[in-house]
Image (cartoon, coloured by chain):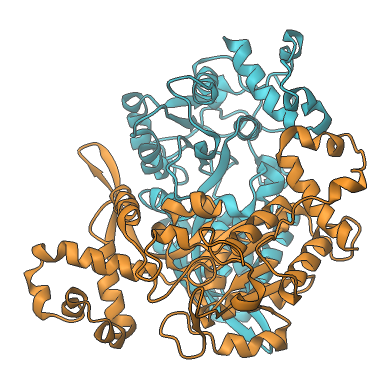
Chain colours: A orange, B cyan
Amino acid sequence: MTSTRVSSGINRRALLAGAAALPVLLGLRIPLHAQAQADPLASWNDGPAKQSILDFVAAVTREGSPDFVPAPRRVATFDNDGTLWCEQPMYVQLAFALDRVKELAPMHPEWKDKQPFKAALDGDMKTIVESGERGTLELVLAAHAGMTSDEFETIVKDWLAKARHPKFNRPYTDLAYQPMVELMAYLRANGFKTFIVSGGGIEFIRPWSEEVYGVPPEQVVGSSIKTKFQMRRDIPVLFRLSEINFIDDKGGKPVGINEHIGRRPIAAFGNSDGDLEMLQWTTKASGRRLGLIVHHTDAEREYAYDRKSSFGRLDEALDAAPINHWAVASMKDDWKQIFAFESAR
Amino acid sequence: MTSTRVSSGINRRALLAGAAALPVLLGLRIPLHAQAQADPLASWNDGPAKQSILDFVAAVTREGSPDFVPAPRRVATFDNDGTLWCEQPMYVQLAFALDRVKELAPMHPEWKDKQPFKAALDGDMKTIVESGERGTLELVLAAHAGMTSDEFETIVKDWLAKARHPKFNRPYTDLAYQPMVELMAYLRANGFKTFIVSGGGIEFIRPWSEEVYGVPPEQVVGSSIKTKFQMRRDIPVLFRLSEINFIDDKGGKPVGINEHIGRRPIAAFGNSDGDLEMLQWTTKASGRRLGLIVHHTDAEREYAYDRKSSFGRLDEALDAAPINHWAVASMKDDWKQIFAFESAR
């Protein structure tokens, strides 16, 4: 049974390899020894989380299976912060906003005496966190508006090229979780379309999502600010306004999924209460479904947090997991390796 | 030159046919006689419009060409009403809204004395058109809100199955323009991703866009109303609210393109002033670009209208075409056949 499942994954991946696909195209059976190829989920330890993924993919991709789902309907959605990359000690996008506020400060002398800008300039995280959603929003808008969409893309790329994570001293894009990158590739090799559905900014993720995750810009769903089309001396631009357009979090995730994708996912992956509604929307429907929560349990290799964290709180969704048969992947136990730069244990 | 171009299109389409792709996978050259296959744009008469498409596709797909664009960036956007299907004597979605208002009328006795509902019930198109954008919006909201997204999909499909176009006495989905359906397939066969970018409702188009145009739901951009995620006795639904979320028309088209696709198109196709900004956003940028306007010039086989039409007015964009080197396809002269059901002249 297991070998059939695995070979089904391998066959489809082989399709992408060109010449290796010939036997499949010709309708030939793959000899058994070809099934002994590399594990597509090599960074996952054997256990219930990995098994739930393999079982699900086998069930929905095997023609004739009662759970079979045709390829165009194999939609999988992934939260980003804390699910695909590190969200501690703060969301990467907040680190970006703080750096940008510092950069813009000379043009805004009033910020020296105005919260939450003063806290941002002083590096006073406690006051920033206490300023709540509204304060954080003010900082983010100041950092993200007032330029064209093309200019913003350049700003994000330039920042990512030089910014370093405080704990790992590496570019933030190195902090993608290797097991999740493998999982996305495995799903795509099995005919899935993989989408990012993030509470973070859609335009903050797109400049690097294809390179880091293999997810093209049109498959990124996220929060956004309003933009306005303008002609500037015969040059068309999209100007970024200091006004929220859409918050792709909690109940907003199913709304964003419906608006962007127009199909209900059959698999969803999250790590916090912000993903609860996406997991409900995905799994509480007819047909075989997969919900999986990444649980941050590894203080040594990454961070350990859940019910009381300021960033990526996982409380209600953790309680909902057993009731809804969602898999829970413990980073400490289920992941052989967390980051690509780290050697496997 | 022409034969190289055409064969490039055919090779890629052949890829989709499975076994026919073997020589390509093996890196073999296709013999010359195989290039003499059917014209992928068979419903287009030879002329400047068709030639501009063939020249553009050849330039951006030929490796080593200074205009070469890698496949993931080959994004083409199509307006829907009047560009891909018939928009006269009124937008199909307005016909849907009027029928639905009639269906809902018994639950709304007040509509008998209230405009624009009275006009809708009386079939008084003059008053409806005079009620302007606001009146039309009221009718559309009444028809499109107050149900879940799943229920709305069923309502649209059921209506399309029984509604008939008043002039052609055929289902509206038969009124897709054959030359444009061919064009979309030709572009996809050449590595393009084709998107619909419509002023019409995104949820009105998605239920049939894959079957009629080969465009999956996630590649449809359109206007939308707000939806709200709700749990109803443990069943998650998206409930459609009587409130506009986004108008994907005029300057909204580049905004919608950026929000949904996150890449700037290299080719855009429209037919009215509502497409002007999309054409500007697409073509006024570096690199080879294609803009094309469908001009309704055939009163006999379809309708003839432009500068003064209530639906699909083409005035400013028609003047902008020669200045911006956009192609203009005259339906009378450039299209051998308009609908699939009609025999070629």
Q: Position of residue A41 (x, y in %)?
A: 70, 60
Task: Name the residue rendered at 54%, 89% in the picture.
Answer: A315
Residue B33 makes an appearance in the image: yes
Q: Is residue A121 left or right of residue A30?
A: left
Where A132 sits versus B57, above or below?
below
Q: Position of residue A203 (x, y in %)?
A: 39, 57
Q: Is residue B67 left or right of residue A59?
A: left
Task: Name the residue rendered at 46%, 64% in the picture.
Answer: A222
| Residue A138: quarter of image | bottom left
**How many marks on residues?**
0
Where B137 sits versus B170, above or below?
below
Q: Quadrant of the N terminus of chain A?
A: bottom right
Where B96 sits versus A83, above or below?
above
Q: Position of residue B98 (x, y in %)?
A: 59, 62
Residue B105 makes an appearance in the image: no
Task: Name the residue rendered at 64%, 88% in the picture.
Answer: A320
Judging depth in this view, the residue of B74 and B229 nearest the camera is: B74
Judging depth in this view, the residue of A86 and A276 nearest the camera is: A86
Task: Name the residue rendered at 33%, 31% in the picture.
Answer: B320
Q: Quadrant of the C terminus of chain A?
A: bottom right
Judging depth in this view, the residue of B293 and B284 nearest the camera is: B284
Judging depth in this view, the residue of A21 and B196 nearest the camera is: A21
Q: Position of residue B151 (x, y in %)?
A: 68, 71
Q: Is residue A200 left or right of residue B181?
A: left
